[in-house]
Image (cartoon, helix red, strand yellow):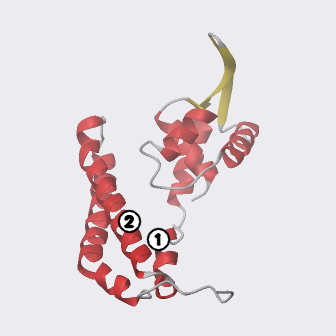
Amino acid sequence: MNVRTLCLSILYDGEASGYDIRRMCTEGNFAYFVEASYGSIYPALARLETDGLVTSRTEQQDGKPARKVYTITEAGRSAFAEELSAPLGPDMFRSPFLLFARFAHILPRDLVEARCAEFLKQTIAGREQLDKAPKEHNCSEADLWVVNYGRAVLEVAEKHLRAHMHELITMARAEPQKDAAE
């Protein structure tokens, strides 16, 4: 899935500005699908408009610069359905914590222990946020299915961390290495 498809998915539910799309990609219901920066959203919106898949209008705002609001067209709705019908690529999972874990053996034990505790806390917070989502947002059945999937993934991650983070901590060096210059 690419940024173009992500923009169409957000616009499928209603009109939005590029800023709104970015916010939904980082904080909203679409944060779980594809990472999208302003540098990728605005060119994608421009191409979608050129292709006739979205239209735009300029809205004046009090005390702020005007904003461009995008709306999906019928052709955009059809193109979105076609893109969703195409074979899916593999899920991409990238984790700074897993890179850290991969090299825990070269790091001081107290640092590894602290990072494990921080990551466990973040994982729990993410799951708790998803636990609240159905109550705080007007979730469709499809939204609820996605939220429940995310909750299940985070529950498994939490369980694994609780059961196995001691192994990672044990792999770490007992004491910080002395600088060779000392």
Task: Measure the C-alpha gap from mark 2 to mark 1.
Answer: 7 Å
Instruction: Say what amino acid the circle numbered 1 marks.
Output: Phe
Q: Would residue 95 be seen by someone viewing this image from the given angle?
A: no
Q: For the residues labelled 2 and 1, say whether their Cβ atoms are less than 8 Å apart.
A: yes
| Quadrant holding the N terminus | bottom right
Residue 178, relative to residue 151: is it above or below? Answer: below
Mark 1 or mark 2, which is nearer the start of the sequence? 1
Number of residues whose C-alpha sits closer than 10 Å to that of mark 2, classed few (under 14), some (14–19) or many (20 or more): some
Pointer 1: what residue? 97
Residue 141, relative to residue 113: is it above or below? Answer: above
Q: Residue at x 76, y 38 (%)?
A: 50
Pointer 2: what residue? 119
The answer to whether residue 131 is left or right of residue 96 is left
Q: Residue at x 41, y 81 (%)?
A: 109
| Quadrant holding the C terminus | bottom right
Q: Residue at x 68, y 40 (%)?
A: 45
Q: Report which quarter residue 65 is drawn in.
A: top right
Residue 164, relative to residue 87: is it above or below? Answer: below
The answer to whether residue 92 is left or right of residue 29 is right
Q: Residue at x 61, y 39 (%)?
A: 75
* Circle number at residue 146: none
